[in-house]
Image (spheres, helix red, strand yellow):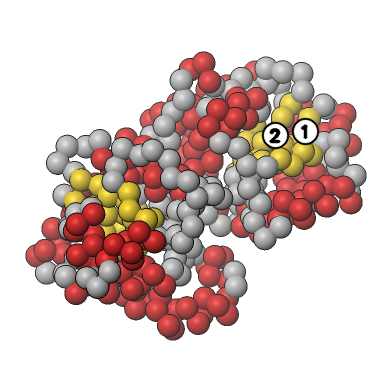
């Protein structure tokens, strides 16, 4: 089975989709009788890391195609795929490629990574309404299936009239010596790590919650660290809000980190925070769990059921008062409670959320879609 992943990845401004697609493709390539290729459809993805799979850049594909077709370019540089998986939404280039694949009877899937939920569609609604009319609805209508990352994402995305498969993200679990030790330090640290999208990630809710319980966090020697790349000057807004509400002794906003620095951030924290309004299947939450870090999450993260069942974290709503009360409770809770939740978090990640498990599940579902497409 030859699978081509097409995604607007960016290593210049890393995000969850970039990590998820690259890691899924690598994990799938480790299975026998599977050939994986990656077409990076973003115009300027930044420096491409070394990956054990063939990678083709959009700009190179256009240059190499010359007067020949996109199809001929793919065949010469990668391979003729049996199945194509388009990641993300509202990318006109993807719709143009999809028409090319349809002309050659190649089935394709759409994996929106949370981009088709009601909440996501409400963001810049007029642009998305126009995009739907111009190309997106036809693009989805031609798909053999839509791949949602979780049941929750599917339920909040409505009926787009296409078959559905559900297969989520994963993690490469770190070694035991890289794990967090929740409750093991005098200073208690709450960590948010991810793209600093204020509305989607609920960072405005987080700052309002901290404002309400500022004195309690001070008294209990607790702090909140917010780490990640900004978008649309969100990092500037966060720092201005921290200064305006005099939260600088409790809240620290830092830029993006990768590799060992990210591992150290997880390892140094006691609790991971993710008060999202909408998600597909957030890799940062899965990474936190794999580091043995208990999580505070909303139902919209789509992993709350598993987390609560495993005793690996706590639920919050989008009410800042609710989050404030949870922060104070966890700032005061016994170290043993955090340590036990951390052990449960690690076990949950190992049992349900590794990339090997995600790859095996997706490949099984892709094979079924391919069989149905060929039989049609």
Q: Are marks 1 and 2 in contact (CB under 8 Å)?
A: yes
Secondary element under disc 2, as helix, strand or loop, is: strand
Q: Point out residue 44 in the picture as x, y percentages from the top left corner.
A: 49, 57
Q: Point out residue 313 in the picture as x, y percentages from the top left corner.
A: 58, 35
Q: Quadrant of the C terminus?
A: bottom left
Which image quadrant for residue 318? bottom right
Q: Horizontal placement of 11 versus 336: left or right?
A: left
Task: Say which residue appears at 54% left-offset and 40% top-offset.
Answer: 285
Location of residue 327 with respect to 13 vertically, above or below: above
Secondary element under disc 1, as helix, strand or loop, is: strand
Quick one: 192 or 217, which is closer to the camera?
192
Q: Horizontal placement of 6 versus 179: left or right?
A: left
Residue count near mark 2 (Cα–Cα under 10 Å), binned few <14, some 14–19, many ≥20: many
Quick one: 19 or 360, which is closer to the camera?
19
User: Which residue has dot 1 on it?
Assistant: 223
Q: Point out residue 250 in the picture as x, y percentages from the top left corner.
A: 82, 36
Residue count near mark 1 (Cα–Cα under 10 Å), binned few <14, some 14–19, many ≥20: many
Mark carried by residue 190: 2
């Amino acid at each position: 089975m030859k699978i081509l992943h097409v995604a607007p990845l960016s290593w210049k401004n890393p995000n969850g989709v970039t990590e998820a697609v690259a890691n899924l493709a690598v994990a799938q390539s480790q299975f026998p009788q599977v050939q994986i290729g990656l077409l990076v459809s973003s115009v300027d993805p930044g420096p491409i890391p070394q990956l054990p799979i063939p990678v083709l850049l959009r700009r190179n594909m256009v240059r190499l195609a010359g007067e020949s077709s996109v199809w001929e370019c793919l065949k010469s540089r990668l391979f003729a795929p049996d199945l194509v998986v388009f990641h993300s939404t509202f990318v006109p280039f993807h719709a143009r490629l999809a028409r090319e694949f349809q002309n050659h009877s190649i089935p394709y899937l759409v994996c929106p990574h949370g981009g088709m939920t009601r909440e996501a569609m409400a963001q810049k609604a007029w642009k998305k309404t126009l995009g739907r009319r111009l190309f997106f609805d036809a693009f989805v209508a031609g798909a053999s299936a839509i791949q949602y990352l979780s049941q929750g994402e599917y339920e909040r995305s409505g009926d787009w009239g296409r078959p559905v498969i559900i297969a989520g993200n994963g993690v490469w679990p770190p070694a035991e010596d890289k794990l967090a030790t929740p409750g093991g330090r005098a200073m208690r640290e709450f960590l948010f790590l991810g793209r600093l999208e204020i509305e989607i990630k609920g960072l405005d809710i987080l700052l309002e919650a901290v404002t309400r319980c500022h004195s309690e966090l001070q008294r209990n020697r607790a702090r909140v660290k917010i780490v990640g790349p900004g978008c649309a000057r969100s990092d500037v807004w966060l720092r201005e809000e921290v200064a305006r509400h005099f939260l600088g002794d409790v809240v620290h906003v830092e830029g993006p980190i990768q590799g060992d620095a990210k591992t150290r951030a997880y390892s140094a924290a006691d609790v991971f925070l993710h008060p999202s309004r909408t998600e597909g299947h957030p890799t940062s939450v899965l990474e936190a769990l794999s580091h043995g870090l208990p999580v505070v999450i909303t139902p919209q993260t789509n992993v709350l059921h598993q987390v609560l069942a495993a005793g690996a974290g706590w639920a919050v709503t989008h009410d800042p008062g609710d989050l404030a009360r949870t922060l104070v409770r966890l700032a005061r809770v016994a170290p043993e409670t955090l340590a036990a939740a951390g052990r449960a978090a690690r076990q949950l990640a190992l049992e349900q959320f590794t990339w090997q498990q995600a790859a095996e599940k997706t490949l099984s579902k892709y094979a079924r879609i391919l069989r149905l497409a060929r039989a049609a």
